[in-house]
């Protein structure tokens, strides 16, 4: 099965590698993002050899310059898989309609909700917000009408996608490798912390999240500060490309003695390193203004590590009963839940392990790509 994967921004190596194992893959990417994200290096390290077509330039240039290579590559594809439902998907759908090559779009974030977070944070003015929303709605409508099918990550995003594309089903994106993300007992957690140079005798909270406009790291920082003020000797660790911004944010918030308990490090490799940080932590915390789902809470649960997260978007749909959910932007409620986890470690881990059983059943990596293969084959068969 020959699949052309059209990427318009950042994409995860776990999805790319999984896709390459169920299809004869060709990938078209924006060159700048591809190189800056390090995806080129990670693919080289993985030893993959499928073609990657790099399109230079920013958004406008990419939009124009990507049409010709998509046209050329689509002739040899059974299916075009388009990342998200906006700019890149529009080019894929236009070419797909002309070439009579079916297009599947894959929704992994909620575009309107994420865009509105920019306005909420004051990054854009009211005119830009109005025009931007209109453009996003138009692109989602056009792509929904043109695409043969839309896959959406989880039930929450499926509901959003179905408003625009009548042929919508739920997908699991790259799922969770539950053999890699696995629980550690107390002794192994101590060993992991020593190896990772992390405090062995303090309550470790792991924030596995990039710093972007839809995330709410301020709430996690304030919640940890409140928990510390109430007696919990906690440290907060962020891994990611924006860890320097995270450390700067802690200073801007003027949190007491922040330099002694706020830690930041560069992103760890998601397929070889990051699981050990989940396994070493006492709790994982994620606060968001908007969230399609977020795989990181599922990865934490797969490690048996308790999760405290905001009850928004897909997290409010998928995590009840397995994680401690708090209202949006409520640092005090998040602090209370972190204190509960610290005071009831056995109960908290039992709750997380119930979450692991759910992840194994509903979100495991093998199921994710098995389901994706079925969809790709069905759409390819319709074309034939």
Image: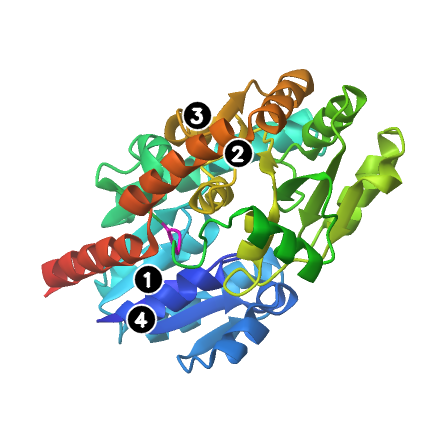
Taking 6 as reference, is 58 left or right? right
Asked if the stretch drawn in magenta spans residue 175, the answer is yes
- Badge 1 marks a residue whose secondary structure is helix
> Can you tell which of label 1 and label 2 is closer to the viewer?
2
Residue under numbered circle 1: 95
Quarter of the image for residue 131 reads top right
Residue lying at 79% horizontally and 50% vertically, measured from the top left: 244
Counting residues from the start of the chain, the first of labels 3 and 2 encountered is 2
- Badge 4 marks a residue whose secondary structure is helix
Region of the chain picked out in magenta, as a range: 173-177
Counting residues from the start of the chain, the first of labels 1 and 2 encountered is 1
Asked if 346 appears above or below 103 in the picture, the reply is above
User: What crowding class fits label 4: few (fewer than 14 Cα within 10 Å), some (14-19), or many (20 or more)?
Assistant: few
Dominant secondary-structure state across the stretch colored magenta: loop
Residue lying at 27% horizontally and 44% vertically, measured from the top left: 361
- Tag on residue 307? 2
> Can you tell which of label 1 and label 3 is closer to the viewer?
3
Q: CA distance from mark 3 to mark 4?
A: 32 Å
Counting residues from the start of the chain, the first of labels 4 and 2 encountered is 4
Q: Locate residue 319, reporting x and y percent.
A: 42, 30
- Tag on residue 21? 4
| Viewer can see residue 171 | no
- Which sits in the foreground, 130 or 28? 28
- Badge 2 marks a residue whose secondary structure is strand
């Amino acid at each position: 099965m020959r699949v052309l994967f059209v990427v318009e921004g950042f994409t995860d190596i776990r999805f790319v590698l999984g896709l390459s194992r169920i299809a004869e893959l060709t990938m078209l990417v924006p060159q700048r993002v591809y190189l800056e994200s390090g995806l080129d290096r990670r693919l080289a390290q993985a030893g993959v050899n499928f073609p990657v077509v790099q399109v230079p330039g920013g958004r406008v240039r990419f939009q124009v310059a990507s049409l010709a290579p998509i046209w050329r590559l689509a002739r040899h594809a059974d299916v075009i898989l388009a990342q998200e439902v906006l700019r890149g998907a529009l080019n894929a759908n236009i070419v797909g309609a002309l070439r009579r090559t079916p297009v599947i779009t894959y929704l992994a974030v909620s575009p309107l909700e994420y865009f509105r977070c920019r306005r909420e944070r004051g990054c854009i003015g009211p005119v830009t917000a109005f025009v931007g929303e209109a453009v996003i709605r138009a692109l989602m409508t056009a792509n929904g009408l043109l695409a043969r099918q839309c896959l959406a990550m989880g039930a929450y995003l499926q509901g959003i996608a179905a408003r625009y594309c009548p042929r919508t089903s739920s997908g699991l994106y790259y799922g969770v490798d539950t053999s890699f993300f696995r629980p550690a007992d107390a002794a192994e957690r101590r060993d992991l912390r020593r190896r990772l140079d992390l405090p062995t005798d303090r309550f470790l909270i792991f924030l596995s999240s990039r710093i972007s406009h839809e995330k709410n790291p301020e709430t996690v920082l304030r919640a940890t500060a409140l928990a510390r003020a109430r007696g919990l000797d906690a440290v907060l660790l962020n891994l990611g490309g924006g860890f320097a911004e995270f450390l700067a944010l802690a200073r801007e918030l003027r949190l007491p003695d922040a330099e002694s308990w706020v830690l930041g490090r560069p992103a760890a490799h998601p397929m070889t390193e990051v699981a050990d940080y989940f396994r070493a932590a006492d709790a994982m915390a994620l606060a968001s203004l908007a969230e399609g789902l977020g795989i990181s809470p599922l990865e934490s649960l797969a490690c048996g590590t308790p999760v405290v997260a905001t009850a928004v978007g897909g997290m409010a749909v998928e995590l009840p009963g397995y994680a401690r959910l708090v209202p949006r932007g409520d640092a005090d409620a998040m602090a209370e839940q972190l204190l509960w986890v610290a005071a009831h470690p056995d109960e908290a881990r039992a709750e997380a392990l119930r979450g692991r059983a759910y992840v194994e059943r509903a979100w495991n990596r093998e199921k994710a790509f098995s389901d994706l293969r079925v969809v790709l084959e069905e759409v390819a068969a319709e074309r034939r």
